[in-house]
């Protein structure tokens, strides 16, 4: 049985051309070799598994090659053969994680003095250099700044911020990038073809994304998947091997969320948890799935989506069903939930609540789309006039009845023609039985001036249901809608039972106000109803201004809770307390207290108390 060599070692790049995803590094090093502009110290920094140590070895081999070809090692000279066979004395590797003391650096500086036997340079590769102690760094400074002409230092680290600035200033710094998913997939396809393994694109994409930009991790996962699946890799088995959720799970849950099907989403979450995945893993993957869908919404951001082939088409199809506003709200909700999930005492309940909120967003999106595509108000035509609807003879008709009727009524509201300058005449209704005087329709009279109150009164009239309905009608038809509040228009409809309904619904209205507007709800605890007018008193001007800014919402809520079949008004009064001078003399104080509490005079008389 032959000894198995892992792919990360077997297919480790041996030339600059075979390095994956670091073209900006390899091009710079090859140009430096071609021009003979070699520095004495280099610093290779970047994430794990991206080729730092590999590039250091290739560079060390190339600068010692006796007959390089296009800045690449020839692999035929004595120096190259010694390097390939592991017997070269020109290249020295040191692990700073286990050799981080001052004595280790002193041994290194003594060794630097020895010139190479074959080749021109002695190359010292120090891996994980950030693990050196502060004293070791200080001992290394002089040698790193002015080494012998034959010495070249290559430092490699994953945490550049831990290295002293004095060390950084003495090195040429090369920052290695994370390897892109496309580059990783291409290299995995090459290795699969060399090993005789067949794999679909989804499987290789999953391995590359799980590796998070590290080629060594990707090759380790590839070996693990081959051990489980054999020479035929398929997406389901690879996802099971790597213990990751497949794309189908996220496509399915997104479909359930868009439909507002929260029972189905909760059942799918239960199935995910039964497979051993944590709720946070599920939420993180779902958040990334929404992000990928958002990238599909614009051709400019499509390149940020690191998927290809049939999977890209699936993202585009589901992206067509998702609104951008919904995606923004969903990503924001999941991001906030992910931050609070670590401190939650019941993580499953938190995840389930987040899923139900997402389903609510999806249902809200569907409802909004339905209301826009199928408006309830009929469109108007500007080339013809619309007559008022027929009214039963047994029902008296007033001007307000023609302007505004409840939506549940069988009679549609009359629509005024925008060219009309006066309201239409009303046909008088026959007298009801028993015989009596016919109902008389009177025009609304101006309010009589009220006598001045001891405090300043400022009032405001609210909006009517008819004006709100007409505003909505105008938004659908695009035509001008007459304003009933202006002079010359028909009177607003007033529910004759408004006062009783408002008083009966006062408690429920207050509870609703405390939920939606808690700051101004306190002003409605002592509200009074006079007809269809709600009167409230506030202690200061800022509170009054805040109520006025929200009066449309307040009146709409009042009409809804009280089930009014007409308009409602709001009158806000500012009570300015007039404070006078307090009494100073003892007699005045006694008089003041006696007026407040008459029993005080009786107590003083019975106990024979003096004033002082």
Image (tube, rainbow, N blue to C red):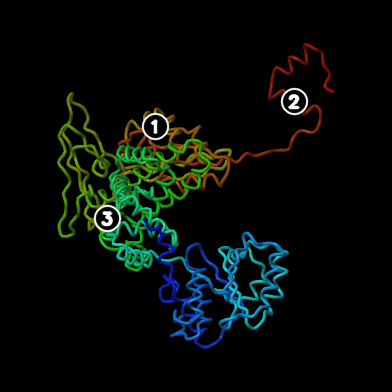
Q: Position of residue 382 (x, y in %)?
A: 18, 59
Residue ID for mark 2: 591
Q: Do the residues labelled 2 and 1 touch (CB within 8 Å)?
A: no
> In 3D space, how far apart are the residues under numbered discs 3 and 1 (Cα atoms)?
74 Å
Label drawn at residue 232: 3
User: Relative to the observer, which residue lies in front, 536 or 239?
Assistant: 239
Could you classify mark 2 by the number of other residues whose Cα lies within 10 Å: few (under 14), some (14-19), or many (20 or more)? some
> In 3D space, how far apart are the residues under numbered discs 3 and 2 (Cα atoms)?
103 Å
User: Relative to the observer, which residue lies in front, 201 or 72?
Assistant: 72
Q: Which residue lies furthest to the front in this view?
A: 1
The residue lying at 16 percent from left, 43 percent from top is 389
**How many numbered tags mark residues here?**
3
Q: Residue furthest top?
A: 606
Label drawn at residue 502: 1
Query: Disc 3 or 2, which lies upstream in sequence?
Result: 3
The residue lying at 42 percent from left, 31 percent from top is 508
> In 3D space, how far apart are the residues under numbered discs 2 and 1 (Cα atoms)?
43 Å
Secondary structure, mark 3, is strand
Q: Position of residue 192 (x, y in %)?
A: 32, 63
User: Relative to the observer, which residue lies in front, 166 or 125?
Assistant: 125
Secondary structure, mark 1, is helix
The residue lying at 21 percent from left, 32 percent from top is 438
Q: Quadrant of residue 405?
A: top left
């Amino acid at each position: 049985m032959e000894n198995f060599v892992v792919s990360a070692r077997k297919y480790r790049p041996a030339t600059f051309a075979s390095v994956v995803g670091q073209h900006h590094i390899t091009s710079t090093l090859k140009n430096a070799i071609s021009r003979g502009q070699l520095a004495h110290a280099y610093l290779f920094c970047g994430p794990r598994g991206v080729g730092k140590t590999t590039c250091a070895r290739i560079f060390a081999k190339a600068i010692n090659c006796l007959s390089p070809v296009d800045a690449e090692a020839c692999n035929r000279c004595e120096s190259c053969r010694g390097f390939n066979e592991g017997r070269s004395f020109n290249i020295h590797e040191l692990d700073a994680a286990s050799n981080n003391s001052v004595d280790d650096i002193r041994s290194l500086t003594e060794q630097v003095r020895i010139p190479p036997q074959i080749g021109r340079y002695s190359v010292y590769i120090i891996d994980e250099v950030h693990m050196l102690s502060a004293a070791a760094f200080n001992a290394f400074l002089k040698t790193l700044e002015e080494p012998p002409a034959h010495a070249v230092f290559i430092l490699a680290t994953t945490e550049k911020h831990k290295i002293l600035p004095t060390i950084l200033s003495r090195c040429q710094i090369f920052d290695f990038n994370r390897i892109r998913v496309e580059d990783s997939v291409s290299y995995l396809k090459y290795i699969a073809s060399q090993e005789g393994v067949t794999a679909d694109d989804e499987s290789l994409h999953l391995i590359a994304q799980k590796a998070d930009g590290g080629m060594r991790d990707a090759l380790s996962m590839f070996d693990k998947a081959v051990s489980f699946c054999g020479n035929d890799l398929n997406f389901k088995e690879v996802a099971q091997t790597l213990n990751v959720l497949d794309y189908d799970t996220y496509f399915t849950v997104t479909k359930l969320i868009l439909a507002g099907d929260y029972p189905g989403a909760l059942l799918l979450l239960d199935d995910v948890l039964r497979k051993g995945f944590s709720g946070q893993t599920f939420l993180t993957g779902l958040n990334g799935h929404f992000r990928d869908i958002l990238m599909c919404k614009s051709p400019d951001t499509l390149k940020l989506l690191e998927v290809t082939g049939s999977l890209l088409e699936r993202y585009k199809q589901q992206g067509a069903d998702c609104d951008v506003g919904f995606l923004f709200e969903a990503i924001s909700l999941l991001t906030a939930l992910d931050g609070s999930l670590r401190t939650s005492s019941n993580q499953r309940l938190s995840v389930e609540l987040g899923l139900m909120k997402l389903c609510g967003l999806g249902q809200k999106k569907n409802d909004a789309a339905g209301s826009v595509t199928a408006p309830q108000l009929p469109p108007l035509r500007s080339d013809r006039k619309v007559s008022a609807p027929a009214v039963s003879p047994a029902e008296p008709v007033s001007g307000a009845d023609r302007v505004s009727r409840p939506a549940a009524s069988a009679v549609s509201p009359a629509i005024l023609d925008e060219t009309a300058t006066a309201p239409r005449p009303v046909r008088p209704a026959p007298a009801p039985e028993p015989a009596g005087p016919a109902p008389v329709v009177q025009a609304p009279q101006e309010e009589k001036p009220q006598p001045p109150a001891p405090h300043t009164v400022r009032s405001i009239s609210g909006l009517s249901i008819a004006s709100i309905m007409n505003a909505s009608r105008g938004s659908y038809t695009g035509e001008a809608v007459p304003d009933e509040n202006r002079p010359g228009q028909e009177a607003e409809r007033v529910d004759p039972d408004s006062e009783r309904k408002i008083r009966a619904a006062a408690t429920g209205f207050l509870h609703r106000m405390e939920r939606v507007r808690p700051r101004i709800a306190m002003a409605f605890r002592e509200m009074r109803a006079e007809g269809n007018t709600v009167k409230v008193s506030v202690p200061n001007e800022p509170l009054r201004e805040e109520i006025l800014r929200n009066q449309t919402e307040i009146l709409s809520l009042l009409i809804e809770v009280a089930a009014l079949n007409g308009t409602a008004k709001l009158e806000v009064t500012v009570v300015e307390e007039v404070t006078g001078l307090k009494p100073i003399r003892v007699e005045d104080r006694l008089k003041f207290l006696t007026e407040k509490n008459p029993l005080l005079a009786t107590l003083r008389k019975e106990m024979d108390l003096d004033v002082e």
